[in-house]
Image (spheres, helix red, strand yellow):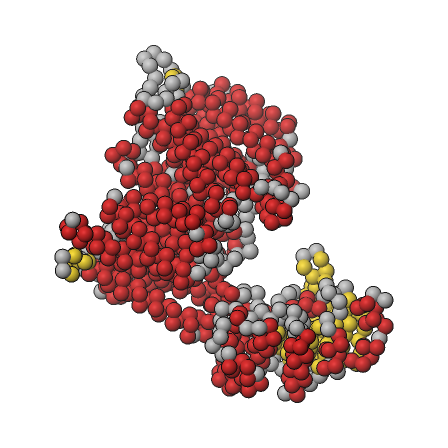
Amino acid sequence: MLELKNINAGYGTFQALFDVSLSIKAGEAIAVIGPNGAGKTTLLRVMSRLLEASAGDMVMEGRSYRDLPSHEVVGLGIAQVPEGRRLFPRLTVEDNLKMGAYTPAARAKRLEKLDYVYSLFPRMAERRYQLAGTMSGGEQQMCAIGRALMSGPKLLLLDEPSAGLAPVIVQSIFELMHRIRAEGYTVLIVEQNIQQVLKVVDRGYLIETGKIRASGTAAELLASDEVQKAYLGV
Amino acid sequence: MSHFTSTHFFRVLLVLLVAAPWLGLGPYPLHLIIMSLLLGFIYTSWALMGRLGLVSLGHGAFLGIGAYAVVLLWNQYGLSPFLGTLVAVAVTVVLALIIGYPCFRFKIVGHYFALVTLALAEVVRLVIVAERDLTGGSLGLTPKPGIPEGETFSIWAMQSSTRVVWFYLILLCWLFALWVWRRVDHSMQRDALQAISEEEDAAASIGINVTRTKLQITVLSAVMTCLGGVLYAQYQLYINPETVSGIGISLQMVFGVIAGGMFVMLGPTFGAVFLLALQEILRVLIGNQVHGLDLLIYGALLVFFIIKMPKGILGTWLERRT
Amino acid sequence: MEFFDIFLVEAMLNGLLLGGLLALLSLGLNLIFGVIDVVWISYAELMMIGMYAIYWTHTMMGWPLYLAFIVGVGGVALLGAAMHWFIIRPVLSAEPINQLLVTGGVLFFLQAVATVVFGIDFKNIGIRLPSFMLGDISLSMARLIAFAVAMVAIAATYLFLNKTYAGTAIRAISQDRAIMPLMGVNPGRIYLLTSAVGGALAGLAACLLVLQYDIHPAIGLSFGPITFLVCVMGGLGNLIGGFVAAFIFAQLISVGGFVFAIEWGYVLAFVFFIAMMFIRPEGILTQRR
C-alpha cells in the first residue's frame, strides 16, 4: 500500500534520516522501533509531509506523493496521531473530533463518523463536551486516535502512543491497537516500548541513528541481536 | 564586521568629518551631515536596547521629553537648557524605570513590550498636544532667542547662530554614542546580555541579575535619546509633537536601525544617512505639490525594504561579502 | 451636586458605548494575533481607510448609506486579506521586529494614501442622527446604534467561531498551529480568512465611527494605541480578556475625559494600565505564549 524508497531528510545542516526504505501492505500492522533520537518521529513527519525529504520517494497506492502539500496528505488516506497526543486543549472533545473530519469528503460523513468513534470509544461520548485539555492522558490518547479515525483513513500512523502514560493505561492502549487492526485499518506504530508493540504487529523495522538496522517479523525482531544492542547497548 | 569597524576606515571617516565644515560644502549639505550625525546618535541609542531583543516602539517619548522640557523651561523660566536637560533626564529616568521595571520583572516582553512603549510615545504626544496653551500644540514651539547682541553663541542659552559650533558639538556626541555602544558591546555585560536575550532562565541561574541589567540598558538608552531630543530642539530651534514624539518618529527610529543593521556599530548611523537621503531625494523629486505623496512612497519603500532585506542594508551587504 | 451627577452618568454611558467600539476593534486585533501571531500596528488605519471608503461612496458618489456601509465592511475585509497576502506572508518566518515594522510601514503608507487622495481637511458624511433624552441625560442616537451593532457583531463572531467549521479551525490553529495540516487544514487559507474577518470587523468599526466623528488621515492614532493597550491588558490573543478590558478602558477614558480634558482621559487610562502592570501582572500575563 505504502512504500518509502531511500528517504533522506534532516533539519538544516543536521541529517536525521539516511536512505530509509520500508513498505506496508494493506491490512498489515508494522512497528518502527528504535531508541531515542533515532529518527522515528522524523520519519512520521516525512510520511505526513510535515517535513521535506531531501531525497527519495514516497508512494501511496501506486502514486508518488513526494511533492504533495502537507494538508492534502489526509486526502490520500494517511492520518497521523502525533507524538504527545497534540489535542487542541481548549476545544471540546467533540470539536477535536470534528477537526479530524475537516476535509470536504470526511466532513460530509462527519455525523456517521462521530457515531462510529463514539461507539469505539464510549468514554469519549460521555465526555463529548469536555475541554480536551482537562482529560487524563489515557483519555486524551483515545481522543487523539479517534480524531485521526474521523478522516476515514486507510493508513493510520501512530507516534509513540504509549509515551508518558501509566503502565495500566499503556496496556489498554495496546488493546485498542488490536481493536483498530480488527476494524481493518492498516497501521504503522512508532514505539519505544518494544515488548508491547511487537505483540500487536506483524512486522517491524529497527531504526537507529537514522538508518534501518533490521527488519523482520515481530518474533524475529524481538529475538534479534540488533534490537538487543540498540536498546541495551550490549 | 571587520571592514566597518576597522580602525583604518574609521580614522579616515573621522578625519573627513572633522574637516567637513572647512571643505566648502555650503550650509545645506553641512546641515544634512549634522542631521545625519544627530540622528545617528539617537538611532545608536535605540540600538543599545534593540540588539538585546528589547524592541521599544516608543523612544519618541524620551525624545519628546528632552526636546519639550528644555524649551519650555527656557521659555517659561529662563532656565538654561543645560539645567533643563537635568530635569528632562530625571523625568526620563523615572519613566524608563516605571515602564521597564514591571515589564522586565514580570517578563512582559516581545510584542507586549513593543505595544506598551508605543502607547507611551502616543501618550506623551497627546499630553503635548493637550496642553496647547503651554506647548503650542500641533503648531509647535520655538525657544526664545538667547544670544546676546553682537555674539554668535550663548552657552547659557545653548544656542548658536553659527552652524560650525553645532557641528562639532554633535560630532562629539555622536562619537560618544559610538563609544558607549562599544563599551556595552565589549564589557562583561555583553556576554551576559547575549545570554539573557537567548536563554533568560539559564542566565538567571548563573546569578546574573537579568532585570537589573535590562533596566540599566533601558535607562541608558532612554537618557541618551532624551539628550538627542535636547540637541535637536536647540539645533533646529523648532519642535512640534509630530517630529519629536509619537508613533511616527518612534517607528522611523526603529526602521532606521533595522535598515542600517542593528548589530553593527555604524549600522544605526548608516540607517540614519539612508533615511535622510531617501527623504531628500523624495523631496527633490516630488516636492510639495501633492501633499503626502512623498510619505506614500516612503512608506511603500519601508515595507519593501523590510520584506526584501530583513537584515538591513548594511547587514545584508556585509553578509554577502563573507 | 445633582447637576454634576447627571453629567457624570452621561459620561459613563458614553463610556459604555465607546467600550462597544473598542471591544470590536480589540476582537479583530486579538483574532489576528491569536491565529497568525502578528500584531497589525496599522489595524486602526484599516478602519480609517474604511471610513474614507464610506465617505467616498456615500458623500462623493451619492450611493445610499447602507450600500456605502457594505462597501466599507467588504472593502476593508478585502484590504485585510490583501494585507496578509502581500505584506504579512513574506515576513511570517522573519523576526517579530520585522513583522511589527512592516505593519508600521503600512501605517505610514495608508495615512499617506488617505492624505494624497482626500487631503488633510476633516471630512464628514453629514449625517446627523438625533440625540434623545433619557430623563435628564442626553444620549446620542448614533452612539447607541453603534453600541448595539457592535454587540451584535461580537455575538455573531462568537457564533461563527464556535459553531462553524471554519470558526473551529480558527480556534484550533491558535492552539496548535503545527498539526493543522494533519487535519487537512491549509493554514494559509485560515490565515487569509482570519485576516479578512479582522478586516471586516475594522470595516464595521468604520461604519459606526463615521456616524459620530469627522474623518481625517490620522484618526487611526486616536484608536489604535488604546486598542493595543486594551489587548495587552486583556492578554494578547485572549478574546474574552480583550472584551472586558475594552469596557474598563472606555470608562476610564470617558470619565477621565469628563473630569479633566479628553486627552487626559487617555493619559488616565495609560496610568491605570501601568498601575495594573505593577499590581496584577498576571492579568496581563494571561497570554498564550
Q: Horizontal placement of C77 versus A17: left or right?
A: left
Horizontal and vertical percent for residue B177? 53, 30
Picture residue at 35% right of the left edge, 66% below the top: C154
Q: Horizontal placement of A182 versus B225: left or right?
A: right
Q: Is residue A184 visible?
A: no
Which residue is at the front of the view, B274 or B204?
Answer: B204
Relative to A57, does residue B136 appear above or below in the rendering? Answer: above
Q: Quadrant of the N terminus of chain B?
A: top right
Which residue is at the front of the view, B192 or C75?
Answer: B192
Q: Horizontal placement of A207 versus B164: left or right?
A: right
Relative to B234, does residue B2 appear above or below in the rendering? Answer: below
Residue B212, by quadrant, is: top right
Horizontal and vertical percent for residue B16? 55, 24
Residue B94, by quadrant, is: top left
Which residue is at the front of the view, C81 or A193?
Answer: A193
Horizontal and vertical percent for residue B300? 44, 48
Count of picture labels: 0
Relative to C40, does residue B145 appear above or below in the rendering? Answer: above
Horizontal and vertical percent for residue B161? 38, 19
Relative to A121, does residue C232 appear above or below in the rendering? Answer: above
Picture residue at 33% right of the left edge, 27% below the top: B73
Picture residue at 24% right of the left edge, 46% below the top: C259
Q: Quadrant of the C terminus of chain B?
A: top right
Which residue is at the front of the view, C45 or A35?
Answer: A35
* Identity of the residue furthest to the top in this view: B150
